[in-house]
Image (cartoon, rainbow, N blue to C red):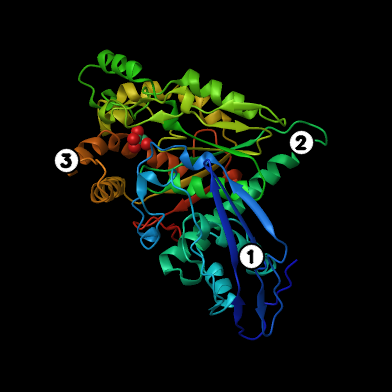
Amino acid sequence: MATLNLFSQPWQTTISPSFCCSNSNNNISYAYQNHNIISNNSKLHFFSNSRHFSVLSQFSTHSSKSGSGSSWLQNSSFAAGIEYRKRPLYSVFPTKAAEVSSVEDLYQFICSGPLLDKIGITQEKVAESIDNWILYGRYLCRLFQLNELYLTEPQKARIYHYYVPVFLWCEQQIEEHQSKFKDGEEIPPLVIGFSAPQGCGKTTLVFALDYLFEVIGRKSATISIDDFYLTAEGQTKLREANPGNALLEFRGNAGSHDLALSVETLASLTKMTREGVKMKLPRYDKSAFSGRGDRADPSTWPEVEGPLKVVLFEGWMLGFRPLPVEAVKAVDPQLETVNKNLEAYYDAWDKYIKSWIVIKIKDPNCVFQWRLQAEIAMREAGNPGMTDEEVRDFVSRYLPAYYAYLPTLYSEGPNGSDPQRLLTIEIDEGRNPILASI
Ligand SMILES: O=C(O)[C@H](O)CO
């Protein structure tokens, strides 16, 4: 266990990492040992035990997702957008001993984060658990191929002000959820919903959390509302049934999802309480039919195995509540049908979610900027991407729903949510958390 007195004199640390990494058949495993931090005035022992973990083929799931367009990943070889789940991950840690300025600096940085108060973690608690913060930070650096010793400010903020605090919050939620069951009772996995606009980095956040759950030994499953889109054929029928409604011409808005599939999937996931139970998770292929999309071939769906502890369920319109018809018509008359369709979504999605994370943006126009950045990055990487005009058209079909439903999502919380089990994270244009404006 770590013994650390952060309130002593400034001190210096020496880190001597030694890694090995192997990769076979989509199965990447890492081992690392003898990571000792020795301080002059304080004692901190961590990683003295050797650990071994494997990262299975989940990196190849959700390959339909577009790139993150994330500036914080600029110096990382991870920042390859669409391909990021497919490529093997290799450690970029230096093999030579390196000096870092101070764990105390890191502690101060962590304590200055905007989420700490919200998640109920005091500075003392950070001090007590600094070894875990460093451990999780290190895992994430490895995942994103960042050099933990030379993180830029945005990278540090992303890891220590965002992903690690959110992970700790999820852990608290899981513990609270589990404490409601008696000894011997089967405990369903906690479904955590992530409601966040497109392009704001929710896929990367969920990817990071899923990875941390895996390395600490909690079985998790990730699913997106996009995985529940109608098939291409169903989409055509929807378009034909709503002639002239631009909001239902392509996938996206309420009405373009297969709600029976989502009920079946979420109900089955919440029953995955036992060792050995397995199920395939539906996936959607956005590249099919020249980008119009179609359900991915079931033979490519990833398999998850119980007992699941947590399900991470994300989507841009998760938790949207239907509004009085006049309110939506005032935003866009075409929303009337979408709003009607939305009435069936609580029972198909939101009802399963017991804890919520809402990522709040100031202005839905950010979605256009973020999507544009992602497409430009894809084009620059030599992959087919939308033109600026196509991006504008694509995003314009989502904006009415944002304008109509985000105000209530932010003021009342997601449909059916418990305010005690809701974490709202306001982010800036760089997609990092900021102190919430009142
Ligand atoms: O591509 C899509 O379907 C939208 O961006 C929603 O994720």
| Residue at image mark 2 | 181
Q: Residues within 10 Å of mark 3 (few under 14, many from 20)?
A: few
Q: Residues within 10 Å of mark 1 (few under 14, many from 20)?
A: few
Camera-nearest residue between 267 and 152: 152
Q: Quadrant of the C terminus?
A: bottom left
Pinpoint residue 253: horizontal percent, then vertical percent: 34, 28
Mark 3 residue type: Glu
Q: What element carries label 2?
A: loop
Q: First in sequence: mark 2 or mark 1?
A: 1
What is the distance, in whole Å, between disc 2 and disc 1 at their CAs?
28 Å
Quarter occupied by residue 246: top left
| Residue at image mark 3 | 389
Is mark 2 in CB contact (under 8 Å) with mark 1?
no
Q: First in sequence: mark 2 or mark 3?
A: 2
Q: What element carries label 1?
A: loop
Mark 1 residue type: Thr
Q: Is residue 76 left or right of residue 128?
A: left
**Ligand 1 closer than 8 Å to label 3 CB:** no
What is the distance, in whole Å, between disc 2 and disc 3 at their CAs?
53 Å
Q: Which residue lies furthest to the right in this view?
A: 183
Pinpoint residue 228: horizontal percent, then vertical percent: 44, 26
Q: Which residue lies furthest to the left in this view?
A: 389
Question: Which quadrant of the picture is home to ligand 1?
Answer: top left
| Residue at image mark 1 | 122
Q: Please determine whether, in this image, residue 379 is positioned above or below residue 242.
A: below
